[in-house]
Amino acid sequence: MAESQSLDEAVIAGQAALSRGDWLAARSEFERSLRQFESPEAFEGLSWAVWWLEDVPRCLDSREQAYRLYRRRDDARSAARMALWLGDDHNEFRGATAVADGWFHRATRLLDGLEPGPEHGWLTVFDAHAALARHDTASARRLAVQAREAGRRHGAVDLEMFGLATEGLALVAEGLVDQGMRYLDEATAAALAGEYENLAPAAWTCCRLISACEEVRDYVRGTQWCRQVDEFSRRMNIRFVTGVCRAHYAAILTWHGDFAEAERELTRARDDLTENRPYWRAEAVVRLGELRRRQGRLAEAEELFGQAPGHPLARRGMAEVSLERGDPGAARDLLNRVLRRIPTTNPVSRAGPLELLVRAEVALGAYESAAGHLEEFCSIAGTVRTQPLQASARVVEGLHAAATGRSALACECFQDAIEMFEGCQAPLEAGHARLELARVLETLGRVDEARREAGIALRCLADLGVTARQHDVLTARQVEVLRLVADGLGDKEIAARLVVSEHTVHRHIANIYIRLGCSTRAAAVAGATRLGLF
């Protein structure tokens, strides 16, 4: 009897250590219990301790041991619980979806006929997560509500709140952003307040909220929550949440043009997000790729996106790389494939690909198709209503207007976008919008204004250390002319080399001055070199 009491005390001590995030102490206590007697409770507790320590083989083994012992005890409910977590583990650690489905189906059969309990709710919320992954938001929302109600009935706050977070994510995906974000805010507040009995869904809740902030481009909300979540994850020693938080915060820093700090955060994030969690590690990898793309380091960006080809940000990133390399056809093909997999009932996930598709179609001269996609994108931006998304909508509206000869409208669009981008502290986006404005002003003959806008934009890009996108600044012919200027050729020699008139060369050089915001050959060559246009 004394031995049994001692064993119970070790398991209880291990569970207490788990609740305060002391994974090493928890492992020690559960191992102490198992040295005396192999109970399913001790194996279950040990599985969680090593889950947090990312000892994947031992985690899976401990869960299976607990499963077998619960089955031997004829405790179907507890065995189903272990089957559920084994299914999730095989998804998260191994990406083995078939194995995961096997465990989920086993849990379903074990729970069949039993009185409803929290395990039924967890099975339902995992089904909701799977529905979200296939963009079936209606099913995800329905299942999440069932899980939330099950949690409330059975006093399982973690299940109730994780169900609420999942419902919130489905609502955001459907464009019901205000309500969805309120649900995610509440669930995350409960997680950080310590209301979740199991810290794993608390961590997932935090990650879902920050991801949703980035998806709808609500960088103010994202910054506020990143600070709270980072403090919580450090206090509870939740390393992978620290990494994910760093990755998302780095995306916000990138948006604000703080590239050096973003790189530091992403480097730390990659250290926190080990190879044991490939899904989460991809969060840091793709955002580092996005940072490199924004810096104009396209080869590095492409290599990083290639490390996580299935990630939505990687697919969008590859499309942007194609656009910036002057291959809008490849970008359009990739974006059409992406959009075919996202139903119109999931507008928020369609927003990013649609924005890029409009740019690609404008570049290809497919103005009618671009107009349809522009209308859809602007509608989404109007529904979501975050300033960064609305500013981006004005940019692509301006691009379409400029390409179809509506220069006055294009000027208004770019001016609005610049004001909004500057208001939400997005210097890179503001700089690119200024370059587009300068090009439209040039076509209208407003040369001094065009030169001023281009000069401001290029100084901004230079201050950020960005290699400018050549096609945003100069045409291919203008670059060709400027290369010859850099080689020391005069106008007559350039005209002979390119088989054009001297007047044409004069015109190209005058336009180069406008677009580079300068007034001499030497300044034009120096500016182009600094911006990486050569």
Image (cartoon, rainbow, N blue to C red):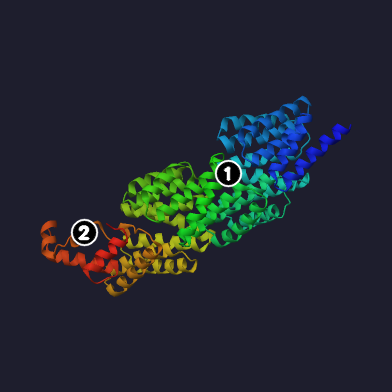
Q: Nearer the viewer, residue 496 or 33?
A: 33
**In the displayed structure image, the side of residue 381 where residue 239 appears, left or right:** right
Residue 483 is marked as 2
- For the N terminus, give its image quadrant: top right
Q: Which residue is tagged 1?
A: 132
Q: In the displayed image of the protein, which residue is found farthest to the bottom?
A: 448
Q: Position of residue 311 (x, y in %)?
A: 49, 44
Amino acid type of the residue tagged 2 in the rendering? Arg
Q: Residue at x 56, y 56 (%)?
A: 213
**In the displayed structure image, the side of residue 39 where residue 447 appears, left or right:** left
Amino acid type of the residue tagged 1 in the rendering? Leu
Q: Residue at x 85, y 32 (%)?
A: 3
Q: Nearer the viewer, residue 189 or 395?
A: 189
Q: Position of residue 483 (x, y in %)?
A: 21, 59
Q: Secondary structure at mark 2?
A: helix
Q: Secondary structure at mark 1?
A: helix
Q: Are marks 2 and 1 in contact (CB under 8 Å)?
A: no
Which numbered disc, 2 or 1, marks the residue that appears first in the sequence?
1
Q: Position of residue 309 (x, y in %)?
A: 45, 41
Instruction: Give above or below for 454 relative to 290.
Output: below
Q: Position of residue 97 (x, y in %)?
A: 57, 33
- C-alpha span from label 2 to label 1: 51 Å
**In the displayed structure image, the side of residue 199 where residue 518 appears, left or right:** left
